Image (cartoon, grey):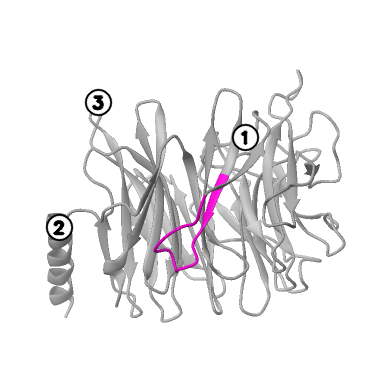
Amino acid sequence: MKTTFLFFNLFFTILTALAGPPSPSLTISKSSFPRLFTDQNGNPVLSWIERTDANLSLVYRVSTDGGDTFGEPKQILLPPSTAAHGEDVPKLIFKRDGTRMVVFSLPKPTPEALRAGNLLYQTSTDQGKTWTTAQPVHRDTTAGKSHSYADLTQLPNGEIGLIWLDDKLPGNEGRSVRFTQTLASGGFGPEVIVDSNACQCCRPGIAVDKQGRIYLTYRDWLPTETGPGARDISYVVSTDGGQSFSRPAVAGYDNWQINACPHSGPQLFVRDEAVYATWYSGASGHEGIRLTRLDKLQSPELILGPQRTHPQLTGWADGRLALVWEELIGEAPNAYHQILLRTYAPDGKSRTVALTAPGELTSLPVLLPTEKGLLVAYQVWHGQDTSVTLKQISFFQP
């Protein structure tokens, strides 16, 4: 049986390679950092960043036909100095009542704290026609403190839950990890410190399971007996709507000791009771992607390869999963990053195919399941310029 499956795997890979990667459904020039998510009605939303010499904008389009087509772009003008990079990009989200919220990091360096800045938000209650004045998510707005690297999700009560990296606490080298949520009356509620010493510049993740438990994950900074701290992945869980969280637990003991920030945070995906986490680890001899469940902790699946980074996971109710990542192919000066897709059948069997052509310079893939298949978006490099490509993967139908 194993031999038969391996032969099928090889046959499918060869067949796909001969057919070539799926054609783009949408290409957006002079854009970067795509995101895929849904609005309050479950419609697919594609967002990206556009930057000129004078302006920076978050632009988004909504699909009302399951991802076949997308509506006209809508623009949210943000401060020109807004942070926008692979680990910290402005994020749009929809509350249950249709209110739109954008959260972004605005650097405010001082001579003593070059990485200081605020985490700001704006809201719109008229379908994005007008937006409120930007306000800080956090309570402490003292100059010289750092607040950035946020992730957010809709909570069971219809409000928005948010995790971010805050300023250092006394006696720690890493940054504190905090959680808050929006209030029906406006603004944000109390802050909850969930970890006091995390990696400084890897994006965190947030998700809510079927029982309403809130999962937070982040790259930790764990003490070691010798050498620098271990930059492994930790998580916490709240069973009371975000009022309190469990003690941090480690998702996988990689013991990745590195005296630097990897700039590659974890991601969460929830399907019913199952809560999945995926991340990159550079642990010596075991470099590559990790995939595991947090609701019933198990040894992570290892997708080994030091050049495989920025994994993102999604899935369907019938048990299928899809994982994308970027992978460095070849050696300089002809090296390039390719987008890979691994699909998992309900029985756990997997197959891996390339979504981009050899030689194409791509990065930062994201994905979203639909009833018709899978949407994948990623960034494409053209010299110093970038564009965003969206593909609808119809071959993933069962």
- Disc 3 target residue: 333
**What secondary structure is the magenta-colored segment mainly?**
loop
Q: Residue furthest top?
A: 111
Circle 1: element type? loop
Sequence-wise first label, 2 or 3: 2
The circle on residue 19 is 2
Question: Is residue 351 positioned above or below 390 on the image?
Answer: below
Q: SS of the residue at dot 2?
A: helix
Between 247 and 388, the residue placed more toward the observer is 388
Residue 351: percent from left, percent from top: 26, 66
Q: Earlier in the sequence, mark 1 or mark 3?
A: 1
Look at the image and tell me in which quarter the C terminus lies.
Answer: bottom left
Q: Residue at x 16, y 80 (%)?
A: 1
Q: What is the CA distance from the residue labelled 2 to the residue labelled 3?
A: 27 Å
Up the image or down, 211 lies above or below 82; here it is below
In the displayed structure, does residue 293 sit left or right of residue 146? Answer: left
Residue 80, image quadrant? top right
Q: How crowded is the residue under tag 3: few (<14 C-alpha within 10 Å), some, or many (20+)?
A: few
Q: Is 114 one of the magenta-colored residues?
A: no
Camera-near label (1 vs 3) is 1
Gap between marks 1 and 2 measured at Cα: 39 Å
Label 1 neighbour load within 10 Å: few <14, some 14-19, many 20+: many
Q: Position of residue 380 (x, y in %)?
A: 36, 39
Q: Which residues are magenta?
A: 59-72
Tell me which corner region of the image, top left, top right, bottom left or bottom right, holds residue 336: top left
Q: Amino acid at mark 2?
A: Ala
Which residue lies at the image location 86% right of the left edge and 57% below the top edge?
Answer: 190
Residue 376 visible in the current orientation: yes
